[in-house]
Amino acid sequence: MFHTTLLLSMPGGSEWLLVLLAVLLFFGGKKIPELMRGVGRGIREFNDAKNNVKNEIEEGMNEKDKNSSNKS
């Protein structure tokens, strides 16, 4: 039987080399910096959204705690 951890393991050195070669062939040397900027922006926006959701959840929990302590 196969374990899912084996199927989802991180690629090794030779696999990364093949991925980088494929990216270079598909996008060319001039497009790669633009592509990386886009990836960086996407990651930054994702992290901002994640932090906003986390802060809203924490504020809601703090508000709930304050309301329950005021009722006592």
Image (tube, rainbow, N blue to C red):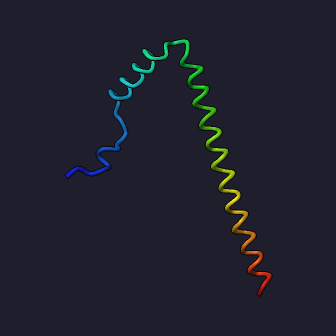
User: Hey, which quadrant is residue 44 in on the image?
Assistant: top right
Q: How many callouts does the rendering have?
A: 0
Looking at the image, residue 55 lies above or below residue 37: below
Residue 31 lies, in percent from the top left, at: 55, 16
Give the percent coordinates (x, y) of residue 25: 42, 15
Q: Position of residue 72 (x, y in %)?
A: 77, 87
Is 49 drawn above or below residue 24 in the view shown? below
Q: Residue 50, position in %: x, y?
A: 63, 49
Q: Residue furthest bottom?
A: 72
Relative to 31, does residue 53 appear above or below in the rendering?
Answer: below
Q: Is residue 59 left or right of residue 8?
A: right
Tell me which corner region of the image, top left, top right, bottom left or bottom right, holds residue 70: bottom right
Task: Identify the residue at image location x=62%, y=44%.
Answer: 47
Q: Is residue 43 left or right of residue 6?
A: right
Residue at 57 percent of width and 30 percent of height: 39
Residue plotted at (45% across, 17% down): 26
Query: Which residue sits furthest right?
Result: 70
Residue drawn 73% across the image and 63% down it:
59
